[in-house]
Amino acid sequence: MILTYIEYLFYKKVGNKLKIIFILQSTTIDQNNRYKKSANFH
């Protein structure tokens, strides 16, 4: 019970960091894809 609660708190902390990292990565990937698409048009 206590172990699962500690795990829950740990995953909650790590999960928030991973979400932020994932959001940042996805936005940079999105920008790269847009750049590639715009480069193809030229």
Image: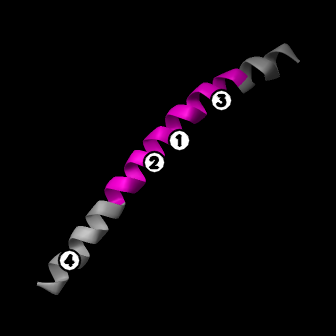
- Residue 38: which numbered mark, if any? 4
| Badge 4 or badge 1: first in the primary sequence | 1
Q: Which residue occupies the extreme right position in the image?
A: 1
Q: Which residue occupies the extreme bottom position in the image?
A: 41
Left or right of residue 7: residue 16: left
- Where on the picture, by quarter, is residue 37? bottom left
Q: Which residue occupies the extreme left position in the image?
A: 42
Q: Which residue is mark 3?
A: 11
* C-alpha gap between disc 3 and disc 2: 17 Å
Q: Is residue 15 magenta?
A: yes
* C-alpha gap between disc 2 and disc 4: 22 Å
Secondary structure of the residue carrying numbered label 3: helix
Residue type at mark 2: give it: Ile
Q: Which residue is mark 1?
A: 19
Q: Where does the magenta region start and end?
A: 9-29
| Badge 4 or badge 3: first in the primary sequence | 3
Secondary structure of the residue carrying numbered label 2: helix
Residue at x 45% of width, y 48% of height: 23
Return the x and y of residue 13 as percentages of the image width and height: 59, 25
Category of crowding for the residue at label 2, using alpha-carbon neighbours closer than 10 angstroms: few (below 14), some (14–19), many (at least 20): few
The reply to whether the C-beta atoms of the residues labelled 3 and 2 are less than 8 Å apart is: no
| Badge 2 or badge 4: first in the primary sequence | 2
* C-alpha gap between disc 1 and disc 2: 6 Å
Q: Which residue is mark 2?
A: 23
